[in-house]
Structures are given as structure tokens and as C-alpha cells.
Image (tube, grey):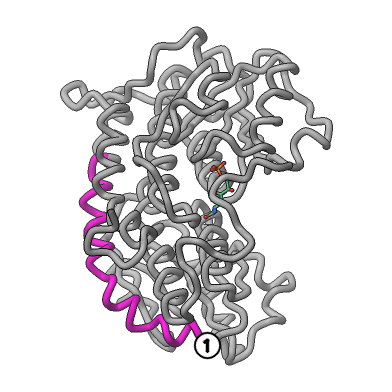
Amino acid sequence: EKGNHRHYMQKEIYEQPIVVAQTLQTYIRPFEQQVALPDMTFSFADVPRITIVACGTSFYAGMVAKYWLEQFARVPVELDIASEFRYRQPVLEPGGLALFISQSGETADTLAALRHAREQGQKVAVVVNVPTSSMAREADLLLPTHAGPEIGVASTKAFTCQLAVLAALAARVACEKGKLSEEEEKDIVLHLTEAPAAMNAALAHDPDIEAMAPLIAKARDVLYLGRGPDYPMAMEGALKLKEISYIHAEGYAAGEMKHGPIALIDDNVPVIVLAPSGPLFEKTVSNMQEVQARGGKVVLISDAEGLAQASEGTIATIEMPKVHPLIAPLVYAIPIQLLAYHVAVAKGTDVDQPRNLAKSVTVE
Ligand code: M6R
């Protein structure tokens, strides 16, 4: 079932261009170049606020979605991890939309949060990979991802499919709120349809990533930095690494380093910087240089343009295709997944079944 692949995780990483394309097919009308969502019993135009709740990797997908929803639809978005949401007495506006993201659709904390939100009069939308799951059954709006079964405990293809659905959702909400012209919607659709090919181009750099893995495998701690939507991607990269290689890793907003974490930097700490060229590039690079000045060993992940500008002093670089900022998270997911994968293989850990973890977390 793993085909030519050594692990399910590797197979699932490689499936991403196809399953993202499959997922997008159900959310995009190619001829009209419009976003299409399943039939709905309510309109996003009436939604005053969106509350996103999820756990783990699905939470990071939600965090990327917050950037998109706020940018495109100008709708206020709150974001919570499910295990905190119910207990902090969240203030939920009547008529608000609560959005739950879950690969399994069974995560106990997320399901309990969903029920709580419903009791508080929220409309409930879910992005799930298992259409028969509890969350799917309890939703007002079901937005399935079409990643196919995900076996590896580390979520990979489910994550990028979540991002694809969430990007389409953000565009749809923006349209209904009158914040997106027809042209702008077409533009978003166009960029989304470019994602699978760009993800393939990212996968082509697998050998470079494999080659640098032994370097990272020796580290005790690894930091990941990014700005904007690459900030949640940095946290996702760190989660992938700790989950399957058992190396301590943290993701930070690049600009936050100087408020404390930079004290951790010495020449034993690899720092993975996610910096696609674009409006946030210069700022991220100057944070990266602060790290280099303290002896931090930087691995820069950027496109040719970014690498040409900022590779100096890095210990390694990973080249990504140049993409529109909207789809950068879908593309930059690939090198962080591959890096975690190869480091885990180099360390000889159980990649598909890491210790202490379960695929579906059904206890609170
Ligand atoms: O099934 P869910 O998406 O609700 O699961 C949430 C988390 O348990 C999950 O994403 C976990 O963090 C992954 N193992 C990360 O790779």
C-alpha cells in the first residue's frame, strides 16, 4: 500500500499535488473561475465574526486561514485551540460562525468545542477529511477535504488540503461580504489552481533536503521563523520535527526573536527561516541576520529571488518556486514536512507511529 515509499508519511507528502488538485476541483468552477461552496442555509454576508477552533496541525491551518479571512473578507476572526476554548468563557456574538478544522473529525476537544459553540447559538462549519465523522454529522456547513485516508500520525496531506479549502472559503466569504470584485476572485482562483504544480516543483528539491537532514539530526534544539502566514507555518514545521524526530523545536514569529528567544541562539542551534520573496521578505531577513550575528546556523527556505539576495552566511538553502503569497503556505509546507521526515529517518525513529501519540485523539 506504501508503493515505492518507505513510509506512509513519505507517500502522503508526495500525494499532495494530486489530492490538493482533487480538493480544489470541488471548490472551484473552472470556466467561471469562481469559488463554489456546497449549498448553505445561511449567508456569510450576515456573519459578524468567525471563531476558528482546532488542535495541533489543524490549528495551524486555522491560523493561516485567519490571515486570509481578515485580509480578503475584512471579517474579524478569533482563533483558539480547542482544549482552551470552552473553559475561557469565550464571548460569542449571536449569529456568529464557528469553524472547526479536523482531519479525523473525531478529536474530543474539538468536538466538545463544537457542541459548546452550538449551544451558544453559533452556526457551525467544519473542515474535515472524514465525511462520516461526528463533526461532519453535527455541522450546518460541511466542507470536506479530499485528501484520502491519512495513515501517518504526522498530518501532511490533510493539512495542505485544509489550506486549499480554507483559501476557497476565505474567497467565498469575501465575495458575499462584497469585499472582492469579480476580477479579484478570478485572480485568487487562478493562483489556487497554480498550487499543485508549484507543490510538485517544491517536491523536486527533496534530494537537497535529504542531504542536509544529518546536520539537523544532530541538533538538540531547532527554531523555525516566519512572518505573516509563514508564522503558523514555522510552528507547523516545529511541530512536525518534534513529533517524529523527538528533537525539541519551536516556531516563532521572526519579529519576536528579539523579545527573548534570541537568547537561545548559539552555534549549536539550527534556525530554519521561511521567507518567500514579497512584502515581508526584508523584515524577515533582517531578523535572520540578527540570528546569524549570534552564531545561529541558518537554513533559508525561499525562492530564487530571495536566495540570491540573502543566502550569504547560511549553512544551507532550500529553493522553492516563486509563487503568489496566497499559495506560499501550501508550497512551503512541503520542505518543512520533508525536513522533519528525513531527520526522523536519519535518527531511526518510528516515522509513521511516533511514541506517545495516536492518530485520532479521542480523550480530552
Ligand atoms: O484529526 P485532527 O485534525 O482534529 O487532529 C488534530 C491533531 O491531533 C493533529 O493535527 C496532530 O497535531 C498531528 N499529529 C500533527 O501532525
Look at mark 1 in the image and give the residue it sits on. Answer: 218
The foreground one among 235 and 337 is: 337
246 versus 232 height, above or below: below
The quarter holding residue 38 reads top left
Residue 149 screen position, x and y as percent = 38, 42
9 versus 269 height, above or below: above
67 versus 2 height, above or below: above
The magenta segment: 193-218
Q: Please, what is the three-letter code of the amino acid marked with disc 1? A: Lys
| Residue farthest along the left direction in this orientation | 31
How many numbered markers are drawn? 1
What kind of secondary structure does the magenta stretch mostly adopt? helix
Query: Magenta includes 215?
Result: yes
User: What residue lies at 58% left-to-right and 35% top-to-bottom?
Assistant: 106
Judged left or right of residue 183, residue 350 is right
The foreground one among 121 and 2 is: 2
Judged left or right of residue 105, residue 165 is left
Judged left or right of residue 269, residue 229 is left
| Residue farthest along the front direction in this orientation | 1
SS type, badge 1: loop
Residue 70 visible in the current orientation: no
User: What residue lies at 65% left-to-right and 31% top-to-bottom?
Assistant: 111
Residue 241 screen position, x and y as percent = 52, 68
